[in-house]
Image (spheres, rainbow, N blue to C red):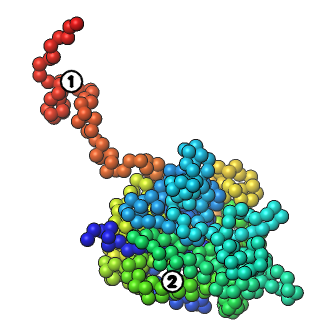
Amino acid sequence: MSAQSQAPNILFIMYDQLRFDYLSCAGHPHLHTPNFDRVAKMGVRFTNTYVQSPICGASRMSFYTGRYCASHGAQWNGFPLRVGEQTLGDHLRREGMACWLLGKTHMKADAEGMARLGLSPDSEIGARQAECGFDSWIRDDGLWAEGPDGFYDEKRSPYNEYLKSKGYPSQNPWSDFANAGIDEDGDIASGWMFRNADKPANIREEDSETPWLTQRTIEFIEQAEGAWCAHVSFIKPHWPYIVPAPYNDMFGANHVPAASRDAIEQDDPHPVFGAYMGNKIAQAFQREDVRQKVIPAYMGLIKQCDDQLGVLLDYLEESGRLDNTMIVLTSDHGDYLGDHWLGEKDLFHEQSVKIPLIVYDPRAQADATRGTTCDALVESIDLAATFVEVAGGKVPDHIIEGRSLVPWLHGEVPDWREFAISEYDYSATPQCVKLGLEPRDARLFMVFDGRYKMMHAEGGFRPMLFDLQNDPEEFHDLAKGDAHQAEIDRLYGYLARWGRRLSQRVTRSEDDIKAMRGKSLRKGILPFMYDGSEVPDDLTEKYRGKAPADYTE
């Protein structure tokens, strides 16, 4: 039997803005997630996994290409992924595996590039370019906001259409029901307002976003033929922080941890850190009454995700598909939730840049590692390499910059990376303006070696440095003094090494180049020789012997 025919299907599940430590298998003291734990017992939980950017769009483009942000260039939400950038779909289809999208992507098509090349969005190639290389089963990016200028996004929402079919009386039922409760006066209590986070969303639980996508996923699997990779991308627990009953009041103030922050962080902070601590998101999460409402809702959203994961797992098991389906659970970034005086994501503290990653490989080679953890430094781009190997292919390492996790899953200890990299381009944010930077200078880089974490900021700023062994909460910025210059220099050396990587020679692999050597000689192109003795005789055979007779008219 060929390696391709033995390849399991791949269920690649992403939860938007899920923190690495908000799972019971990762040690959360109050939030019980038995189905995440169930997959962890079946597979390997990677405990040191970092995204290539702590912002949705850039992070996802790295997941989908297996390349760093500086390589693929789509470094912010709404920055198009350029036409021609190879994606999971391109790599997997070469191995006979279909690649489907269900849910959210944050993909922005390179419309200008497609037009330049004459690619119609209605063509198969054009549609895949517009969907980040996926074939789209059902795409819905969520956040169907509506303001004085109309919808935030004019594309049709399959989820909104579903709610309309269920009888919700609105042109935008996501806004009026899924993202809203009802206040004491019977008025809409929008989920956009933190003060409403403790109210139940005014929607039947089974009609809310997470169960909706779960059922669409089961429908997809039911009809799927041949080998497939399905990227199932849930919008939750991403804000707005509002969840239907019974999840809205499962957790309360007694389940809200004290914020992980210290006054020393506000003492002469790094200018970029200071700018983010002063923005409106951070100021909201610096209020304890906000945390007391938002965090229980966030936990409720995760609990609902876990319950729906259980629905999927039960379906796979009962239908006999579990033994032939690789399951990957992860997130595109974390959520500060008031830690470090911040909200949202953006910077490189663990709460933001570190993500959960649990991988179940159903094959017998993974039996020895079931229920274990792996502390290796993993990057999100490693999943693309992993999937190609699982599909039976050779990882094209001149294109994909991640490394396959299969050796770790199979109990091996491969030669591995010394450091992890993450990037953040904040040129489109108010913080760039506040700091007086040109867009090209509003860029951050993280280098982390497993102990020391450094943030480099373009624009002439000093770095930040944390020692996670002695300061796991990342309160003390060691770059404020000069006692750790040797560590800073060493990490800058890593950053320079990374910056010298070969990232753009994507049309020729190492094997291609080796195979090219000498081909022109075989076709008789023999310059720079004195008498031909410099090459094997067979290469000069056509140029030896008697001369042709003189040609005369």
274 or 402, nearer to the observer: 402
Residue pictured at 65% horizontal, 49% vertical:
440
In this rendering, does residue 259 appear at all?
Answer: no
Q: Which mark is residue 530?
A: 1
Residue under the point 66% across and 83% down:
207
* Left or right of 270, for residue 504: left
Q: Is residue 275 above or below residue 265?
A: above
- Do callouts 2 and 1 mark residues in contact (Cβ within 8 Å)? no
Q: Which x, y percent locates residue 73?
A: 56, 53
Q: Which mark is residue 312?
A: 2
Quarter of the view holding residue 536: top left
Amino acid type of the residue that numbered disc 1 sits on in the rendered structure:
Tyr
Nearer the N terminus, badge 2 or badge 1? 2
Most extreme residue toward the right, as rendered?
185
Q: Quadrant of the C terminus?
A: top left
**Which image quarter: residue 269?**
bottom right
Instruction: Residue 285: give its label.
Output: none
- Horizontal side of 48 relative to 527 (left or right) equals right
Q: Position of residue 448 (x, y in %)?
A: 51, 66
Give the secondary structure at mark 2. helix
Mark 2 crowd level (few <14, some 14–19, many ≥20, 10 Å Cα): some
